[in-house]
Amino acid sequence: MDAPARTLAVTRAAMRFCMLRGWAPVEQVPLPDGRRADIVALLPNGDVAILEVKSCARDYLCDAKWSEYRAWCDRLFFAVDLDFPQALLPDGVGLLVTEDREAALLRDAPEHRLAPARRRALLQRIALLASGRLAMLSDPAGAAELRAALRLE
């Protein structure tokens, strides 16, 4: 399986993992610092988790920005497949391992609480992003018109 297909498979299994636990996951969330988190999930207790998807060792070794995600979540996880060399991953993050459509939590993420103002800003950002995406799904033609109008500006 090539890297894009592997990334998609891990992402889907991680999203399913979140939903089965009552978490509300959102893919590809732009963060205020300019980074983009693979998955941000709101937990039932109000916590914010970020799941960083890695498709292979090369993907992990070429991308050191994941450590900056700690500033934007209460818990940070890596989501990888069974073939990923887990020894590469640091100990101070959670670990989710996927196979096909399934995912297992091998290591829970340590908690580091967000400041209240940052939590509020992040929750608002996630809500606007998710509701906008949902609106586009309910009106694909309107979404296409909006994208075309934005390209012209």
Image (tube, helix red, strand yellow):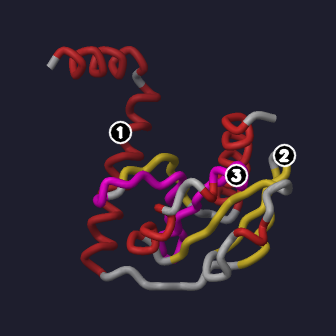
Report, in whole angstroms, how far the alpha carbon at label 1 lies from the one at label 2: 29 Å
Amino acid on which disc 2 is placed: Asp
Identity of the residue drawn at 70% across and 38% down:
3
Query: In the image, which is nearer the foreground, mark 3 or mark 2?
Result: 2
Query: Where does the C terminus fall, quadrant-wise?
Result: top left
Identity of the residue drawn at 54% across and 85% down:
111
Q: Is residue 139 left or right of residue 14?
A: left
* Span highlighted in magenta in the image: 32-59
Name the foreground residue: 59 vs 104.
59
Count neighbours of disc 1 (C-alpha within 10 A) and say few if under 14, some if 14 to 19, many if 20 or more. few
Task: Identify the element where label 3 is drawn.
Answer: helix
In this view, 91 is above or below 16:
below
Residue on which disc 1 sits: 132
Q: Position of residue 19 (x, y in %)?
A: 65, 56
Amino acid on which disc 3 is placed: Arg
Q: Pointer 1 and pointer 2: residues touching (CB < 8 Å)?
A: no
Query: Where does the N terminus fall, quadrant-wise?
Result: top right
Residue on which disc 2 sits: 100
Quarter residue 104 falls in: bottom right
The disc placed on residue 16 is 3
Quarter residue 14 falls in: bottom right
Amino acid on which disc 1 is placed: Gly
Name the foreground residue: 1 vs 44.
1
